[in-house]
Amino acid sequence: MAEEKYVYFFGEGGKEMKNLLGGKGANLSEMSKIGIPVPPGFTITTKVCNEYYENDKKYPEGLNVQIEDNLNKLEEKTGKKFGDPKNPLLVSVRSGAAVSMPGMMDTILNLGLNPDTVQGMVELTKNERFVWDSYRRFIQMFGNVVLGIGHEKFEKILDSIKEEKGAVLDTELETEDLKKVVEQYKKLVKEETENEFPEKPEEQLQMAIDAVFNSWDNERAISYRKMNDIPDKIGTAVNVQSMVFGNMGNDSGTGVAFTRDPSTGEKKFFGEYLMNAQGEDVVAGIRTPKKIKQLEDDMPEVYNELVEIYKKLELHYKDMQDMEFTIEKGKLYLLQTRNGKRTAHAAVKIAVDMVEEGLITKQDALLRVEPNQLDQLLHKTIDPKAKVEVAAKGLPASPGAAVGGIVFDAKRAHDLNEEGKKVILVRTETSPEDIEGMNAARGILTARGGMTSHAAVVARGMGKCCVAGCESIVVSEEKKELKINNKVLKEGDKITLNGNTGEVIIGELELIEPELKGEFKTLMDWADEVRTLGVRTNADTPKDAEKSIEFGAEGIGLCRTEHMFFQEDRIRAVREMILAEDIVGRKKALDKLLPMQKSDFFEIFKVMKGLPVTIRLLDPPLHEFLPKSKEDIEWLSSEMGVTVEKINEKMDSLHEVNPMLGHRGCRLAITYPEIAEMQVQAIFEAACESVKDGNKVVPEVMIPLIGNEKEFNNLRELSKKKADEIIKKHDVELNYRIGTMIEVPRACIVADKVAENAEFFSFGTNDLTQMTFGFSRDDVGKFVPEYIRKGILEKDPFQVLDQEGVGNLVSMAVEKGRKVRKDLKIGICGEHGGESSSVEFCHREGLTYVSCSPFRVPIARLAAAHAKLKEE
């Protein structure tokens, strides 16, 4: 039996082997095959990572032999020997999962250096400063990544030696200074670990490989995977690659480049580089890099070769590429290429442009844009009418606008966000440890770093507004202070960020909603050509309805009538109805509400121009409309001329132990049919008058919370009788439907009986989830995060539809309902209707439409197109 292959030399694999070699390894192999200058190396597969975790952190048999064989091959290729004091081979060790996880995994450069190989390198290069600079970098990276010593402890030593020397930049330190840094770094390692720094290259390599595999399970990697829906089981590969050096002098350098602008999607070469530096310097944001175009002046031949390579790679991969390169003594090497992270705006523009350039098909373009990414495009911008006084300007690292109180550490940002406060995370520079705070913040501001720094890349991926490299500000995390010019801001002070221009403004500015046009409209039109699942919106006001039409909704799937009752001019009449002694008093109050409800429906019908409008009859329990505080009760008493005692008595009588399972929905309409009658009258009077005005109207009456076909039949009869009476009185032609909201598990079980008279079903998945799990959706915050952390639940079932449990009930109801009524229209109107995996489920189950909030309509449209394309 052939031995399992665990290690692949660059060139043995290819881009199609991402799952086994990780994205980085697969692309390094692919580039080696197509003639791109890549330093040779080898990849230890993701299979090793998975076996390592499955077997209690033990490596598979035969792995060491395969690593040794590939190391020998690497020595032959480079003409150098690992650990040889005269001609040493130095390597980098990098992680690389199948899915790109920027800044989440750990990198080590210059591995193989020790006092002997340092001397050998000095002899070979005749550049003592470069060698000692490489050595101090190696100890710092190895000390941080492998030995777990805080990065800031090394920085403190480096800063104190720079201060002593009067140096501002690392490059100003001379050989003797760097020797001192190395000596103090080693002393720090001994103090922190009680062991000497490892000197044997073989031991260094093994420890580095261990560290990469162990980093797959570190907190920030787990957190990033959760945020981006990356499965834990895919594992990471390890790439061992011969070193090339960007820090050998002014004819060497390093950079990061994109084949198109990752912020705007514009077709122009975009990137940054630093001369006499190593790769980490560019992304760490410690020195502010130069724009890629300046390389044409610094090294024209290298620049032209790089342009040639980027064009070749984009054509080969048919996607925007993110490349890392190093120039060693005037020679260019590519260290990585991958499909570049981009903002939603850039993703849409690049996808549409590439179709127009003939690189990809429309179907490819649709699949290139993740539905949830569109959320970024729907973000706010600063109102152009606002008076803007720019206090500072940095780099426009990630578009959008954000307003919030400033905070200086990630944990505080997370905690304040949990309390419902809007925050802006302000840091000198961000690091992977800040991931949760970045996720919680409305926007991110950093004093250091370029357009490819950690803050920039992560913010773009999250769709957060970010201003990076704002060098005119001074951030003191310790004092919790931000200095802008001569002004000192403290935690909680408000600022506004403009991620499109890099501007920082003190105070709060008005933000405005986005508009969708250009490439976005084109992509959405393509999505509409492909999808078969309808997309409606949840809208309770004409304004919401207008916004949803703008976003491409094909009707209203849920209009909640109770939201109209909370308006100031109506709430009094509602309370009057609740406090009435008898049906006469209730009807008197309802007569006041009737014209208000009718006017609301009339305006909504006008906006929807013949598209279906599903109106749910009153759903919440009556106590929700009464005041809670003593002051409000006293005010209501004086306003309505009713004693405080009487109000309290009524509140006591309405009190329920579990109101979500109590007197609400259809139960309320059955006990107080006059409420349902008034609402049906308002709907059909508005509809008939609208028809007389020359409008097409498609009203759909939805009866909520039924668990029994008799509940539905009772209220259907009431609604139909009232509707037909009004239509006859107005003498108009009007088609309408009466259906039900399926949100009680029992309704799914008896769906065939319900479908005998119901003309449509709409799944209220928020309540259906609540009743299926037995979770109170208002209280799940106390335990669901812990369930997710412990792996009891994969996702919050109120955000992502639980397909195994709730989904099975939906499937049952669809099957039973359509057995009885083949043309039964079936939708979903919980917020799951705008979540992409839930939309895909609805497509598979053959639903007619999904309905979601207006701002999620474009997401649902694209997700429905994805579902259809994946099916095909």
Image: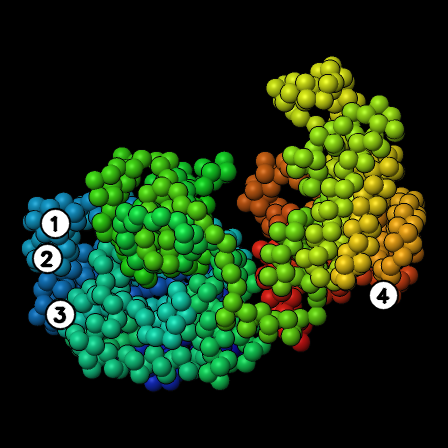
Give amino acid for label 3.
Asn
Residue 431 percent across, percent down from the top left:
34, 51
- Mark 2 crowd level (few <14, some 14–19, many ≥20, 10 Å Cα): few
Residue 143 percent across, percent down from the top left:
27, 51
Give amino acid for label 1.
Lys
Q: Is residue 571 left or right of residue 826?
A: left
Residue under pointer 1: 162
Name the one closer to the observer, 583 or 356. 583
Identity of the residue drawn at 85% across and 65% down: 823
Give amino acid for label 2.
Glu
Looking at the image, do the residues carrying marks 4 and 3 touch, with CB atoms under 8 Å apart? no
The quadrant of the picture occupied by the N terminus is bottom right
Above or below, comparing residue 460 to residue 91 in the picture: above
Looking at the image, do the residues carrying marks 1 and 2 touch, with CB atoms under 8 Å apart? yes
- Mark 3 crowd level (few <14, some 14–19, many ≥20, 10 Å Cα): some
Q: Earlier in the sequence, mark 1 or mark 2?
A: 1
> Mark number for residue 172?
2
Name the one closer to the observer, 570 or 831. 570
Which marked residue is nearer to the observer: mark 1 or mark 4?
4
> Mark number for residue 823?
4
Looking at the image, do the residues carrying marks 3 and 1 touch, with CB atoms under 8 Å apart? no
Q: Earlier in the sequence, mark 4 or mark 2?
A: 2
